[in-house]
Amino acid sequence: MSSTRGLATLLLRKPLVPGRAAFHASAPAYVKVGDGIPNLDVLHENSPGNKVNLATELVGDGIIIGVPAAFSPSCSNSHIPSYINHPALPSAGQVFVVSVNDAFVMKAWASSLDPTSTSGIRFLADPSAAFTRALDLAFDGRALFGGSRSKRYALVIKDGSVHGVHVEPDNTGVDVSMAGKVLKGL
């Protein structure tokens, strides 16, 4: 009985992203060019009480970078530093890094990567993976990370809508979402 009620709730809930079904009968088709940013108050910056809604925060141009885990070797040694150190970063607009971690971990990670905050990159926690799931960019990371995690990606945002999608085909690799490829031509 409760499983029937759970399925009915899932089928009847409103989609988190307008125009996208809340229930997938087939493999999800992740965020695509032309989509809006999910309008959710689920991201945290520096503390759980400081919520950020990227749909209202990022209305112009910018980049949303998704990573599987703060402090992981690829994220800390190459992916995010490729943005922090890229000469075209200032022309990219607002830049946000989102990870399925808590706000305290993201704050500590930001301090370790950009101690003086000179890059302007903002680090946001997605503790329940709600934002990541709304983009259809979550994967089962139990084997490596203990739970649901974000695929590694970069979304180029123009006028509040997705203009470019760069998702690593293997979820965690470091290639198509690197700053050199994403910022090229901005």
Image (spheres, rainbow, N blue to C red):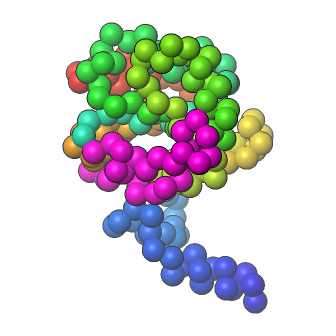
For the record, the magenta segment spans 31-59
Query: Could you tell me residue 116's position as x and y percent?
Result: 51, 13
Q: Residue furthest bottom?
A: 1
Q: Is residue 93 left or right of residue 180?
A: left
Q: Quadrant of the N terminus?
A: bottom right
The residue drawn where x is 28% and y is 45% is: 59
Which residue is pictured at 53% across the width and 53% down the height?
A: 42
Q: Residue at x 26, y 21 (%)?
A: 91
> Measured along the vertical axis of the image, is residue 114 above or below residue 11?
above
Quick check: 180 left or right of 27? left
x and y percentages locating residue 51 in the rendered image: 51, 48
Answer yes or no: is residue 173 visible.
yes
**Closer-to-camera residue (34/26):** 34
**How many labels were placed on the picture?**
0
Name the quadrant of the C terminus. top left
Q: Nearer the viewer, residue 176 or 35?
A: 35
Query: Horizontally, is 93 left or right of 141 in the view?
Result: left
**In this view of the protein, can residue 75 be seen by the observer?**
no
| Residue 80: percent from left, percent from top | 51, 21
Q: Quadrant of residue 180?
A: top left
Q: Is residue 128 magenta?
A: no
Q: Residue at x 47, y 47 (%)?
A: 52
Hey, which quadrant is residue 9 in on the image?
A: bottom right
Residue 97 x, y percent position in the rendering: 49, 32
Question: Based on the displayed image, in which of its 4 quarters is residue 78 positioned?
Answer: top right
